[in-house]
Image (cartoon, helix red, strand yellow):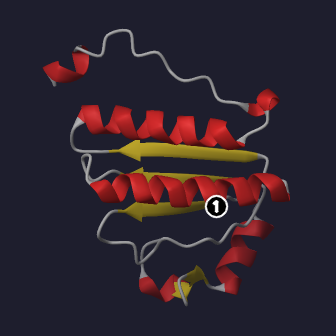
Amino acid sequence: FRHESFFFCYRLKQEVIELLANNRAATVITDTALYRTFVHGSVSSTRVLIRFSANNGHSSDALRVQQWVERIMTWYNAGMKEIYITVHATETRPQIEIMRLLIQKLNQELPEHHKINEPKFYDEQQSELF
């Protein structure tokens, strides 16, 4: 949801959450640097999708990652079952670095049996080709 009519005080309106919940649909939360109007904390089920748009290595990316780690751990401790995260950037290298940072920070918080394997980028040079 991106239109302001779906939101009230930086949260999805209750009727929107209920519609999603009644249809067993998860919320999608978009976090775009410098345009965080629609970064809401509303969830409608035990799963959520976070769309994180990186700002190509700007210092605000690391701050936002830390904020997401804190929120994800709150959800995790409350019983959230599935958390999906996509990272977007206009350049590939910052995208990889943000994903690594996010995984490292989450692994510092998660119990051993839920730690995330850090992806191995066998051909990181490939990112330089595009």
Please, is residue 16 above or below residue 97 in the view? below
**Image x and y of residue 30, in percent:** 46, 62
**Image x and y of residue 11, in percent:** 59, 81
Instruction: Check disc 1 and give the amino acid type.
Output: Arg
Q: Which residue lies furthest to the top in this view?
A: 122
Q: Which residue is painted at 59% across and 52% down in the image?
A: 69
Q: Which residue is painted at 26% across and 46% down in the image?
A: 57
Mark 1, other Cα within 10 Å: few <14 / some 14–19 / many ≥20: few
Can you tell which quarter of the image residue 84 is in? top right
**Image x and y of residue 85, in percent:** 54, 45
Q: Would you name the residue on which mark 1 appears? A: 71
Please, is residue 123 above or below residue 49 in the view? above
Q: Which residue is painted at 39% across and 72% down in the image?
A: 36
Q: Is residue 55 left or right of residue 71?
A: left
Total of numbered circles in the picture? Answer: 1
Can you tell which quarter of the image residue 22 is in? bottom right
Please, is residue 126 above or below residue 100 in the view? above
The C terminus - image quarter: top left
Q: Which residue is painted at 35% across and 45% down in the image?
A: 88
As helix, strand or loop, the secondary structure at mark 1 comes to helix
**Image x and y of residue 80, in percent:** 78, 53
Q: Is residue 69 left or right of residue 53?
A: right
Q: Is residue 6 left or right of residue 125?
A: right
Please, is residue 102 above or below residue 113 in the view? below
